[in-house]
Amino acid sequence: MTTPTRTLGTTGPQVSALGLGCMGMSALYGDADRAESIATVHAALEAGVTLLDTGDFYGMGHNELLVGEALRTAPAARREQALVSVKFGALRGPDGSWLGYDGRPAAVKNFAAYSLQRLGTDHIDVYRIARLDPDVPIEETVGAIAELVEQGYVRHIGLSEVGAETIRRAAATAPIADLQIEYSLISRGIEERILPAVSELGIAVTAYGVLSRGLISGHFTADRQLAANDFRALSPRFQGDNLRHNLALVEALRKIAEQKGVSVAQIAIAWVLAQGPRHGATVVPLVGARSRNRLTEALGALDVTLDAADLAAIEEAVPADAAAGDRYPAGQMTHLDSER
């Protein structure tokens, strides 16, 4: 198949219209199958997916090592087409606890040195701090990445989960390729201020959580037992009455998907794909497939065409702000500059 491409903003690289989010292959969604994870990365590259997203704190380096192995063992032609986006800055304890974020210039360069080693590469294609460090001005953090760009260790600068004011300050410091942020049918908070800002500044959006961590994939059920190391066991949207309410929204969406002859996941991803033109921005969904089956399903969204009537029906079934529960537990919500 031929995967369409999009450009990450006015200064960024050309990437596939869907990217592969690799986090779940190492962390936060319970145990994963390493061999299947690598096979999924290979299948994505073979299908023309060029954008791979990881973070140095996913599994405390495990995910970067996995992505590095997947690239090293992929056919040379596919490996050369791959672009790796890396998030840094999250501080972890040996027990996996979250200890804050570090955006100091020296820390930025230190994180990059370790990522380059784990990935087995001489450069990172897009580099971004995962969350704003409240003690370090964004200008200093972005300025340090800009120095890495000048030195050839980084190709492009990205942002993650920051609000419109921070985006503007960052863009005034150095060229920004994209903003990585959660965006889905049930997480639409970026539409009021953030999408207009990135559109004005020529910054793309790489949207994660397009299936809300599987909640709106059509595969999640109310009786599913989550492992203790699964983030969703603590996520407000997956708890009790919230979960039942949110799954009712999924059933409403399923009726529309069935009428279109597609899966729930495909129509949810297709909705995100359609939002760029509606908001004058470039939007590239990141799909967190951990298996080749889920990847194949997600790629099918590229063939789904939604007209104005389809979009209206989808948004009537799942209105903005219809979801019950925040997208993160309260403690993690405080780290989101995008929510301020």
Image (cartoon, grey):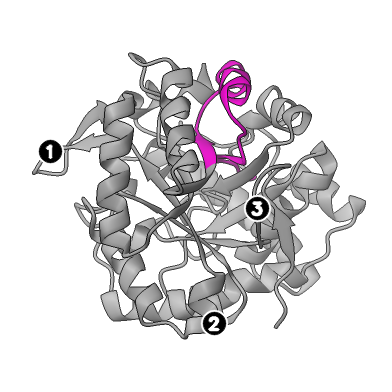
Mark 3 lies on a secondary structure that is strand
Q: Position of residue 267 (x, y in %)?
A: 70, 61
Q: Nearer the viewer, residue 328 or 107?
A: 107
Q: Which residue is mark 3?
A: 284
Where does residue 322 sit, x and y in percent of width and height? 62, 35
- Evaluate whether residue 29 shows in this view: no
Disc nearest the viewer among 3 and 2: 2
* Residue 178 is a magenta residue: yes
- Label located before the other in sequence (3 or 2): 2
Distance between the alpha carbons at the discs numbered 3 and 2: 23 Å
Q: Give SS at disc 1.
A: loop
| Residue sitting at x 70%, y 83% | 1
Q: Is residue 240 left or right of residue 182?
A: left
- Residue on which the image places disc 1: 93
Q: Residue furthest left?
A: 94
- Tell me, yes or no, whether the highlighted magenta stretch contains residue 46: no
Amino acid type, label 1: Gly
Q: Residue at x 55, y 19 (%)?
A: 166
Displayed quadrant of residue 71: bottom left
| Residue indicated by mark 2 | 77
Q: Image height check: is 71 above or below 6?
A: below
In this rendering, the count of numbered labels is: 3
Amino acid type of disc 3?
Answer: Val
